[in-house]
Amino acid sequence: MLGEHEDAKLLAGGHSLLPMMKLRLAQPAVLVDIGRLPLAGVGTGSDGLTVGALTTHHDVATSAEVTGRWQAFAEAAASIGDPVVRNHGTAGGNVAHADPASDLPAALLALDGELVAAGPNGARRMPADGFFQGLLTTALSPTEVLTELRLPAQRPATGSAYLKFEHPASGFAVCGAAAVVELDADGRCARARLCFNGVTEVPLDAVPVTAALTGTDLDDSVIAEAVADCLRVEEPLADTFASGEYRTQLARVYARRVLRAARDRVRTAHDHTGGGAGG
Amino acid sequence: MSDPAQPEPVTITINGREHRAQVEPRTLLVHFIREQAGLTGTNIGCETGLCGACTVMLDGAGVRSCTQLAAQADGRSVTTIEGLADGDTLHPLQQAFWEKHALQCGYCTPGMILASLDLLQKNPDPSDQEVREALKGNLCRCTGYHNVVIAVRHAARAMAGAATAAGEA
């Protein structure tokens, strides 16, 4: 059906597409309602978490599996819109829509997520890294349907968090930051991830910051220094509410906060607070 | 498939009564409720999902009826503000909004009450902060939020009391 109609759009919860149509930012000729396909539900296995594309934000945010082990993803889902929006907005719709002010993309990227799409030639898996290609543009082809989001199993001594500065009226992310931190046996940073929504057209992956943090003790001052020295925002988004300069400053502030939050989660869970960090 | 511009048959049960109509695919649920069913208690505010005035229950969960096509609700069940009272007996939320003066102009009230019902179904005893978070998507331009919070918590106590009384009876 998608192949027959050049200007068709898939409709899931409708909470992104319908407002855009009313604002005449999208004018599809044909809508295909996929809302009743059996693509909802959260599952866990040895290789990680699967979230069906039609799982609502409410069901993601309140799933004990997600809140327990993929905290950044649960917190991103919990921060979308308001409770009534979360009842009907879907994880797959959110990601496929690729609104830069949305919440799930940075969390998905920071947690090394993957996406599964079905098309005329079968299913394919693709990494979140590279999926977001531009404003409202993804690697999905016009004849593909996003069916599932996958998050790999979290390694031991790993914690994550999502924090955002939201537009006070719409709730969209002016700056949303997702961080993942893994500590080694000495309580030092074995690996970190830091990604942002709202700041650039596609989720910003702050690799230089996390590279600078690897091997450090992740003290507040170390985090602050790495963010100050290494966080670069190329071509920040700008609108009447928030200039590019302002968004960049928010990214610095939220980078520090979210890295500390992810770190504290691991320390609390694994009691690395004092031990072994040395000097 | 059918011509995209042609009317589609849609059947929606609203407050227990089935409503069938041929509607254009573009018809929003809120327009179906107001124009096909004639139930004008559900108000239209911003029409972009931000103000909450059009909130109704769809299969038991709150939804923005301006951000949902009637066709998406085909075969489903909707509760609007008109469906809450039991005859002449107001729903505890309606009673509480009245007693606690939780409205001024009243435009946002149906949406506030339905969003509050969604909250109390998930969390029967919310804190002030939880009520405020649950209603963050319901805008009152009279800015009368203070008494709304009082009313929702009052209704929560009334509903818990009624549930206890029913359990003892």
Image: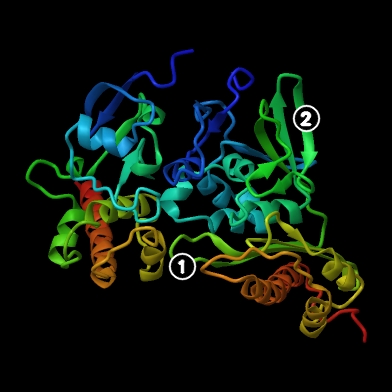
Q: Residues within 10 Å of mark 2 (few under 14, many from 20)?
A: few
Name the residue rendered at 40%, 21% in the picture. Answer: B5
Q: Chain of mark 2?
A: A
For the image shown, how many numbered marks are present on the structure?
2
Q: Chain of mark 1?
A: A
Could you tell me which secondary element the residue under label 2 belongs to?
strand
Query: Along the horizontal axis of the image, is B3 left or right of A101?
Result: left
Looking at the rendering, in which quadrant would you find the N terminus of chain A? top right
Name the residue rendered at 48%, 49% in the picture. Answer: A86
Q: Name the kind of residue labelled 2 in the image.
A: Arg
Mark 1 highlights which residue? A168
Query: Which circle marks residue A215 in the picture?
Result: none
Q: Position of residue A30 (x, y in %)?
A: 50, 26
Which one is in front in this view, the residue at disc 2 or the one at disc 1?
1
Mark 2 highlights which residue? A124
Q: Position of residue A76 (x, y in %)?
A: 60, 57
Q: Name the kind of residue labelled 1 in the image.
A: Pro
- Picture quarter containing residue A220? bottom right
